[in-house]
Image (tube, rainbow, N blue to C red):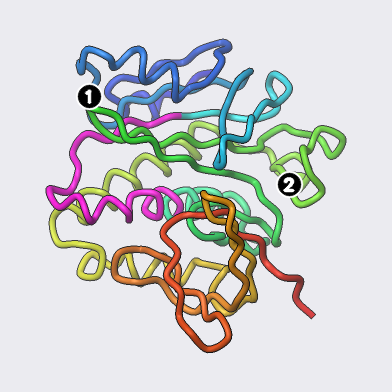
Amino acid sequence: MRLPRTHALADPLIVLDSCGSTNAEMRERHADGRLGHLAVVVTDSQTAGRGRLDRTWTTPAGAALAVSVLLRDLPADVDAWGWLPLAAGVAMTDAVAAQLPAHVVGLKWPNDVLVDGRKICGILAEVTPHGVIMGSGVNTAMTTDQLPVPTATSFAVLEADADIDRLLSDYLIALRDRVAELARVGATASGLHHDAEKRCLSLGRDVEVTLPHGETVHGRAVRLQDDGCLVVDVDGAPRAVASGDVVHARLA
């Protein structure tokens, strides 16, 4: 992969022909704390990726992009870190939307990017002793037969030729700026809270949320709290959800 724009932003950019997991690769390479803020590991052949709820994520070689970004310049207030996955989600939503102007692109809370209601990208944050790793997988050249589930999509299925360097550089610039402003003035003053709500396709929808310990919450997603939690109206009572797997109810 030739990625000149991404190379100019990353500190450093590490391009691999193949690897088990870009997040694991980032952890190993950063074990001594030497990589910089916005270090990037990227491959189009990931064989042992991991998603939320410890799901495995593997794709045919060349069909999807796996990228992990190391964030080191973090908000001093650890409570603000809950906004980091949303910052990444907003950044990736905008990067994807820039290349798919004829489609509806939005965010399923907290950080799945949907195109016309189907998932094109998932993001997973991992906290390490030296920073936060933001791992994402974008379906680029995946064919219809290669899609893991019927609710997924890809640039190829949408008959779009993804510009990988533009996608990554747009994502990195937006993520860098969002995190910097979050650290400087917080989620509300920086506009992240507003922008995440604006892009969040979960709001106003009936949802089913599977929590990490297995409980399932049913209700209507109504807003994001000041800490980034999703507020679900459950029979008239608000329930704040800090993490979980969200399924949107079908629209009538």
Q: In this view, does 172 lie to the left or right of 209?
A: left
Query: Between 23 and 180, which is closer to the camera in this rendering?
Result: 23
Q: What stretch is highlighted in magenta?
A: 68-89
Q: In which quarter of the image is residue 43?
A: top right
Q: Residue at x 19, y 62 (%)?
A: 186
The answer for how far apart the CA atoms under marks 1 and 2 are is 33 Å
For this orientation, the residue located farthest to the bottom is 236
Count the labels in the image.
Answer: 2
> What's the amino acid at mark 2?
Thr
Q: In which quarter of the image is residue 230?
A: bottom left
Q: Is residue 94 left or right of residue 54?
A: left
Q: Residue at x 48, y 29 (%)?
A: 67
Q: Is residue 62 above or below residue 101?
A: above
Q: Is residue 63 left or right of residue 164?
A: right
Q: Which of marks 1 and 2 is nearer the N terminus?
A: 1
> What's the amino acid at mark 1?
Gly
Q: In this view, does 182 lie above or below 207?
A: above
Q: Which mark is residue 238?
A: none
User: Would you name the residue on which mark 2 appears?
Assistant: 153
Q: Which residue is drawn at 58% across and 78% down?
A: 220
Q: Residue 36 carries which label?
A: 1
Element assignment for label 2: loop
Q: In this view, does 234 lie above or below 163?
A: below
Quadrant of the snapshot with the N terminus: top right
Q: In this view, does 71 lie to the left or right of 153?
A: left
